[in-house]
Image: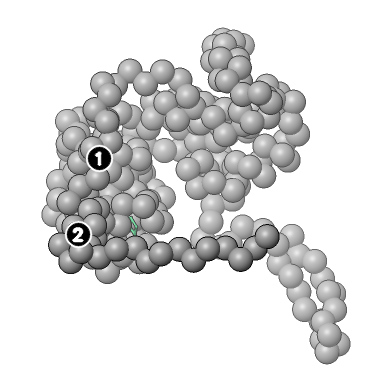
Amino acid sequence: MTVPNVGSSNGERVFIRLGPPPEEPNQFVVDGAPQSYSDEVRARLEVEAKEIIAKYPSSRSALLPLLHLVQGEDSYLTPAGLEFCSQQLGLTGAEVSAVASFYTMYRRGPTGDYLVGVCTNTLCAVMGGDAIFEDLKDHLGIGNDQTTSDGTVTLQHIECNAACDYAPVVMVNWEFYDNQTPASARELVDSLRSGEPLAPSRGAPLCKFRETSRILAGLPDQRPDEGQGGAGPATLAGLRVAKENDMQAPEVPESTDD
Ligand code: FES
Protein backbone atom coordinates (compact mmCIF):
# COMPACT_ATOMS: atom_id res chain seq x y z
CA MET A 1 0.00 0.00 0.00
CA THR A 2 1.34 3.45 -0.82
CA VAL A 3 0.49 6.48 1.29
CA PRO A 4 1.07 9.54 -0.90
CA ASN A 5 1.74 13.15 -0.08
CA VAL A 6 3.14 12.80 3.41
CA GLY A 7 4.83 16.12 4.09
CA SER A 8 8.36 16.59 5.45
CA SER A 9 9.74 19.47 7.50
CA ASN A 10 11.45 21.13 4.51
CA GLY A 11 8.32 21.05 2.41
CA GLU A 12 9.38 18.18 0.12
CA ARG A 13 6.94 15.37 -0.39
CA VAL A 14 7.99 11.89 0.68
CA PHE A 15 6.29 8.60 0.00
CA ILE A 16 6.03 5.83 2.52
CA ARG A 17 5.57 2.38 1.09
CA LEU A 18 4.10 -0.14 3.50
CA GLY A 19 4.10 -3.88 3.08
CA PRO A 20 6.47 -6.82 3.26
CA PRO A 21 10.11 -6.24 2.30
CA PRO A 22 10.89 -7.35 -1.29
CA GLU A 23 12.71 -10.48 -0.06
CA GLU A 24 9.97 -11.52 2.34
CA PRO A 25 7.17 -13.82 1.22
CA ASN A 26 3.75 -12.25 1.37
CA GLN A 27 2.08 -12.87 4.65
CA PHE A 28 0.15 -16.11 4.64
CA VAL A 29 -0.68 -15.86 0.95
CA VAL A 30 0.06 -19.21 -0.65
CA ASP A 31 -1.71 -20.67 -3.66
CA GLY A 32 -3.69 -23.75 -2.68
CA ALA A 33 -3.47 -23.13 1.05
CA PRO A 34 -6.50 -24.50 2.90
CA GLN A 35 -9.02 -21.81 3.74
CA SER A 36 -10.86 -23.88 6.33
CA TYR A 37 -10.65 -27.30 7.94
CA SER A 38 -12.95 -30.22 7.30
CA ASP A 39 -15.29 -31.21 10.12
CA GLU A 40 -13.10 -34.22 10.88
CA VAL A 41 -9.88 -32.20 11.14
CA ARG A 42 -11.57 -29.46 13.11
CA ALA A 43 -13.02 -31.93 15.63
CA ARG A 44 -9.62 -33.56 16.14
CA LEU A 45 -7.83 -30.24 16.56
CA GLU A 46 -10.49 -28.91 18.91
CA VAL A 47 -9.81 -31.74 21.37
CA GLU A 48 -6.10 -30.92 21.37
CA ALA A 49 -6.69 -27.17 21.49
CA LYS A 50 -8.91 -27.60 24.54
CA GLU A 51 -6.14 -29.54 26.28
CA ILE A 52 -3.63 -26.80 25.48
CA ILE A 53 -5.88 -23.87 26.42
CA ALA A 54 -6.64 -25.47 29.80
CA LYS A 55 -2.99 -24.97 30.79
CA TYR A 56 -3.33 -21.19 30.79
CA PRO A 57 -5.20 -18.92 33.19
CA SER A 58 -6.28 -16.74 30.27
CA SER A 59 -7.22 -18.46 27.02
CA ARG A 60 -5.56 -15.85 24.80
CA SER A 61 -2.22 -16.81 26.34
CA ALA A 62 -2.53 -20.08 24.44
CA LEU A 63 -2.14 -18.38 21.07
CA LEU A 64 1.54 -19.25 20.58
CA PRO A 65 1.08 -22.99 21.24
CA LEU A 66 -2.09 -23.07 19.15
CA LEU A 67 -0.17 -21.58 16.23
CA HIS A 68 2.32 -24.43 16.61
CA LEU A 69 -0.60 -26.87 16.70
CA VAL A 70 -2.03 -25.72 13.36
CA GLN A 71 1.48 -25.51 11.91
CA GLY A 72 1.77 -29.18 12.82
CA GLU A 73 -1.36 -29.81 10.74
CA ASP A 74 -0.35 -27.93 7.59
CA SER A 75 3.46 -27.53 7.96
CA TYR A 76 2.92 -23.76 7.85
CA LEU A 77 0.38 -21.18 8.93
CA THR A 78 -2.57 -21.21 6.56
CA PRO A 79 -5.80 -19.20 6.51
CA ALA A 80 -7.50 -22.32 7.89
CA GLY A 81 -5.07 -22.51 10.79
CA LEU A 82 -5.26 -18.82 11.60
CA GLU A 83 -9.04 -18.88 11.49
CA PHE A 84 -9.07 -21.93 13.78
CA CYS A 85 -6.88 -20.12 16.36
CA SER A 86 -9.03 -17.04 16.13
CA GLN A 87 -12.22 -19.01 16.76
CA GLN A 88 -10.80 -21.09 19.60
CA LEU A 89 -9.51 -18.06 21.48
CA GLY A 90 -12.12 -15.44 20.64
CA LEU A 91 -9.50 -13.22 19.00
CA THR A 92 -9.83 -11.20 15.83
CA GLY A 93 -8.02 -12.27 12.69
CA ALA A 94 -5.88 -9.15 12.98
CA GLU A 95 -4.81 -10.06 16.50
CA VAL A 96 -3.84 -13.57 15.45
CA SER A 97 -2.01 -12.42 12.31
CA ALA A 98 -0.13 -9.74 14.22
CA VAL A 99 1.33 -12.33 16.57
CA ALA A 100 1.84 -14.99 13.90
CA SER A 101 3.78 -12.65 11.64
CA PHE A 102 6.07 -11.44 14.43
CA TYR A 103 7.85 -14.71 15.26
CA THR A 104 10.18 -16.39 12.82
CA MET A 105 9.43 -19.91 14.05
CA TYR A 106 6.03 -19.66 12.36
CA ARG A 107 6.33 -20.62 8.74
CA ARG A 108 4.62 -18.77 5.91
CA GLY A 109 4.97 -21.44 3.26
CA PRO A 110 4.90 -25.23 2.99
CA THR A 111 7.75 -26.80 4.92
CA GLY A 112 9.56 -30.04 4.21
CA ASP A 113 9.98 -32.90 6.66
CA TYR A 114 13.17 -31.28 7.88
CA LEU A 115 13.67 -27.56 8.32
CA VAL A 116 17.43 -27.10 8.01
CA GLY A 117 18.49 -23.80 9.52
CA VAL A 118 22.04 -22.62 8.99
CA CYS A 119 23.10 -19.94 11.44
CA THR A 120 24.68 -17.08 9.54
CA ASN A 121 24.77 -14.66 12.43
CA THR A 122 28.04 -13.02 13.39
CA LEU A 123 30.01 -15.73 15.16
CA CYS A 124 28.76 -18.63 13.08
CA ALA A 125 29.32 -16.60 9.92
CA VAL A 126 33.01 -15.97 10.66
CA MET A 127 33.45 -19.58 11.77
CA GLY A 128 32.09 -20.89 8.47
CA GLY A 129 28.29 -20.52 8.59
CA ASP A 130 28.18 -18.46 5.41
CA ALA A 131 30.28 -21.08 3.59
CA ILE A 132 28.00 -23.87 4.84
CA PHE A 133 24.90 -22.04 3.66
CA GLU A 134 26.33 -21.38 0.20
CA ASP A 135 27.51 -24.97 -0.06
CA LEU A 136 24.12 -26.39 0.91
CA LYS A 137 22.33 -24.18 -1.60
CA ASP A 138 24.54 -25.64 -4.33
CA HIS A 139 24.30 -29.17 -3.01
CA LEU A 140 20.51 -29.15 -2.67
CA GLY A 141 19.84 -26.96 -5.71
CA ILE A 142 17.55 -24.64 -3.75
CA GLY A 143 17.68 -21.14 -2.34
CA ASN A 144 16.80 -19.66 1.00
CA ASP A 145 13.37 -20.73 2.25
CA GLN A 146 12.94 -23.24 -0.54
CA THR A 147 12.21 -26.96 -0.36
CA THR A 148 13.75 -29.85 -2.27
CA SER A 149 11.49 -31.39 -4.89
CA ASP A 150 11.15 -34.59 -2.83
CA GLY A 151 9.67 -32.52 0.01
CA THR A 152 12.26 -33.59 2.56
CA VAL A 153 14.43 -30.52 3.18
CA THR A 154 13.58 -26.84 3.53
CA LEU A 155 16.69 -24.71 3.73
CA GLN A 156 16.78 -21.49 5.66
CA HIS A 157 19.41 -19.16 7.02
CA ILE A 158 18.68 -18.31 10.61
CA GLU A 159 19.82 -15.90 13.26
CA CYS A 160 21.79 -16.68 16.41
CA ASN A 161 20.58 -19.75 18.25
CA ALA A 162 22.44 -19.02 21.47
CA ALA A 163 24.86 -21.82 20.68
CA CYS A 164 27.75 -19.62 19.60
CA ASP A 165 30.19 -21.71 21.64
CA TYR A 166 29.55 -24.55 19.18
CA ALA A 167 29.76 -22.36 16.07
CA PRO A 168 29.06 -22.88 13.33
CA VAL A 169 25.79 -24.60 14.15
CA VAL A 170 23.07 -26.03 11.96
CA MET A 171 19.63 -26.77 13.36
CA VAL A 172 17.28 -29.36 12.00
CA ASN A 173 13.74 -28.98 13.29
CA TRP A 174 15.32 -26.97 16.12
CA GLU A 175 17.72 -29.70 17.21
CA PHE A 176 21.41 -28.78 17.27
CA TYR A 177 24.18 -30.04 15.05
CA ASP A 178 27.31 -28.44 16.44
CA ASN A 179 30.66 -27.48 14.93
CA GLN A 180 29.59 -28.08 11.37
CA THR A 181 31.63 -27.83 8.18
CA PRO A 182 30.39 -27.73 4.58
CA ALA A 183 31.26 -31.44 4.27
CA SER A 184 29.50 -32.48 7.49
CA ALA A 185 26.44 -30.37 6.61
CA ARG A 186 26.24 -32.06 3.20
CA GLU A 187 26.43 -35.43 4.91
CA LEU A 188 23.67 -34.31 7.29
CA VAL A 189 21.22 -33.25 4.59
CA ASP A 190 22.00 -36.41 2.59
CA SER A 191 21.10 -38.45 5.67
CA LEU A 192 17.79 -36.58 5.98
CA ARG A 193 16.94 -37.25 2.36
CA SER A 194 17.89 -40.91 2.62
CA GLY A 195 15.45 -41.47 5.49
CA GLU A 196 18.19 -42.26 7.99
CA PRO A 197 18.83 -38.94 9.75
CA LEU A 198 22.06 -38.45 11.65
CA ALA A 199 21.50 -37.92 15.36
CA PRO A 200 21.70 -34.37 16.74
CA SER A 201 24.81 -33.41 18.71
CA ARG A 202 22.74 -33.16 21.90
CA GLY A 203 19.19 -33.26 23.09
CA ALA A 204 16.35 -35.44 21.94
CA PRO A 205 16.28 -37.61 18.80
CA LEU A 206 15.17 -35.90 15.62
CA CYS A 207 11.56 -36.06 14.48
CA LYS A 208 9.81 -34.62 11.46
CA PHE A 209 8.76 -30.99 11.27
CA ARG A 210 5.05 -31.50 11.85
CA GLU A 211 5.72 -33.63 14.91
CA THR A 212 8.17 -31.01 16.18
CA SER A 213 5.45 -28.39 15.84
CA ARG A 214 3.04 -30.52 17.86
CA ILE A 215 5.63 -30.92 20.61
CA LEU A 216 6.19 -27.16 20.63
CA ALA A 217 2.42 -26.80 20.99
CA GLY A 218 2.76 -28.61 24.30
CA LEU A 219 1.41 -31.98 23.27
CA PRO A 220 3.16 -35.04 24.73
CA ASP A 221 6.72 -35.61 23.57
CA GLN A 222 7.10 -39.36 23.12
CA ARG A 223 10.83 -39.22 22.55
CA PRO A 224 13.13 -40.59 25.27
CA ASP A 225 14.31 -37.84 27.59
CA GLU A 226 18.05 -37.65 27.04
CA GLY A 227 18.43 -34.24 28.64
CA GLN A 228 20.01 -31.33 26.85
CA GLY A 229 23.58 -32.50 27.31
CA GLY A 230 24.54 -29.88 29.89
CA ALA A 231 27.32 -27.37 29.44
CA GLY A 232 30.18 -28.67 27.27
CA PRO A 233 33.89 -27.76 27.38
CA ALA A 234 33.43 -24.85 24.97
CA THR A 235 30.68 -23.37 27.14
CA LEU A 236 32.80 -23.67 30.27
CA ALA A 237 36.11 -22.48 28.79
CA GLY A 238 35.84 -19.01 30.35
CA LEU A 239 35.05 -20.46 33.76
CA ARG A 240 38.01 -22.85 33.50
CA VAL A 241 40.42 -20.00 32.66
CA ALA A 242 39.01 -17.90 35.50
CA LYS A 243 39.57 -20.72 38.00
CA GLU A 244 43.10 -21.44 36.73
CA ASN A 245 43.99 -17.78 37.22
CA ASP A 246 42.19 -17.43 40.53
CA MET A 247 40.01 -14.71 39.06
CA GLN A 248 37.10 -13.36 41.06
CA ALA A 249 34.06 -11.39 40.06
CA PRO A 250 34.38 -7.77 41.26
CA GLU A 251 32.46 -6.78 44.35
CA VAL A 252 29.09 -5.26 43.62
CA PRO A 253 29.00 -1.78 45.18
CA GLU A 254 26.24 -1.26 47.67
CA SER A 255 23.29 0.59 46.31
CA THR A 256 23.00 4.19 47.46
CA ASP A 257 19.30 4.25 46.62
CA ASP A 258 16.95 4.56 49.58
S1 FES B 1 25.97 -16.81 16.04
FE1 FES B 1 25.33 -18.80 15.51
S2 FES B 1 24.55 -19.59 17.38
FE2 FES B 1 25.17 -17.59 17.89
- Camera-nearest residue between 34 and 187: 187
Residue beneath the point at 54% across and 29% down: 65
The answer to which image quadrant residue 86 occupies is top right
User: Residue 163: image x %, image y %?
Assistant: 31, 52
User: Residue 68: image x %, image y %?
Assistant: 51, 31
Residue 114 vertical placement versus 247 (above, below): above
On residue 230, the disc is: 1
The answer to which image quadrant residue 198 occupies is top left
Quarter of the image that includes the N terminus: bottom right
| Element class at badge 1 | loop
User: Residue 203: image x %, image y %?
Assistant: 26, 34
Residue beneath the point at 38% across and 25% down: 211
User: Residue 210: image x %, image y %?
Assistant: 41, 28
Q: How is the image coloured?
A: one colour
| Element class at badge 2 | helix
Q: Is residue 123 left or right of residue 7?
A: left
Whether residue 59 is visible to the viewer of this picture, yes or no, is yes
Q: Is residue 16 left or right of residue 39?
A: right
On residue 243, the disc is: 2
Residue beneath the point at 28% across and 36% down: 228
Q: Quadrant of ligand 1?
A: bottom left
